[in-house]
Image (cartoon, rainbow, N blue to C red):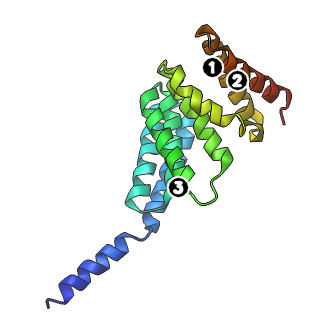
Amino acid sequence: MKLVTPFALLASVLLSACANPINRVTSDNYAETCSIAEDNGKLEVAEQACYRALVNVDLGNLGPELKSQRLYNLGRIKQRLGKFSEAELLFKESLQIEEKLTGPSEIKIGRRLVTISVALAGQDKWSEGVPYLERVLPIADQFSGQERAHTAEILTQYSKHLRKSNETAIAERFETKAMALRGNKT
């Protein structure tokens, strides 16, 4: 009888470390609800659904790639709701995960760098956002469509703010990159 208890404990520990398909389905369902609510302009509903999608990633041990994506999605919604400090933390955690993944995606890292800079600007922390955008400069050419145009606009806004702070060298680099992105749309 004494062997059953340690064996049962070991079995439960091992099983809890495995990905749970029920949590995957639940997380995916909440992520879909989040997307639909966002598309319909129901950002409060989207926020709750994205949060629940993230929680189920943790509960089900669904892996760092999915956690990073769910953090990023929740951060986007928080940012749209004007909750910039919450969005900043979510984006930074997602960035940390992306940078640790085997074969990290430059585009995913670039997206997170841009969104962090936007979250910081939304809190009037422009100077804190500059290093993130500097890291985006060599990646930004890989963006296309709206993402490319959005990045160009963020660089332009930072450039304007930097000029007001007499940081003309970095302002010129940001504006030059913004113009190049606008001229090379794909």
Q: Residues under labels 1 and 3: Cα distance? A: 31 Å
Check disc 1 and report its element: helix, strand or loop: helix
Q: Residues within 10 Å of mark 1 (few under 14, many from 20)?
A: many
Q: Is residue 36 left or right of residue 55?
A: right
Q: Residue at x 56, y 29 (%)?
A: 117
Q: Is residue 177 visible?
A: yes
Point out residue 170 in the picture as x, y percentages from the top left corner: 67, 21
* Residue type at numbered disc 1: Tyr
Q: Residue at x 74, y 28 (%)?
A: 149
Residue position for label 2: 174
Q: Residues within 10 Å of mark 2 (few under 14, many from 20)?
A: many
Q: Residues under labels 1 and 2: Cα distance? A: 7 Å
* Residue type at numbered disc 3: Leu
- Extreme residue toward the left, this view: 2
Which comes before the other along the chain, label 1 or label 2? 1
Q: Is residue 62 above or below residue 110?
A: below
Point out residue 126 in the picture as x, y percentages from the top left corner: 54, 20
Q: Residues under labels 2 and 3: Cα distance? A: 32 Å
Q: Is residue 106 above or below residue 45?
A: below
Q: Nearer the viewer, mark 2 or mark 3?
A: 2
Check disc 3 and report its element: helix, strand or loop: helix
Which comes before the other along the chain, label 2 or label 3? 3
Residue position for label 1: 158
Q: Residue at x 66, y 36 (%)?
A: 136
Q: Is residue 140 left or right of residue 128?
A: right
Which quadrant of the figure has residue 38?
A: top right
Which quadrant of the figure has residue 15?
A: bottom left
Q: Residues within 10 Å of mark 3 (few under 14, many from 20)?
A: many
Which comes before the other along the chain, label 1 or label 3? 3
Residue position for label 3: 66
Q: Is residue 169 above or below residue 20?
A: above
Q: Is residue 34 visible?
A: no
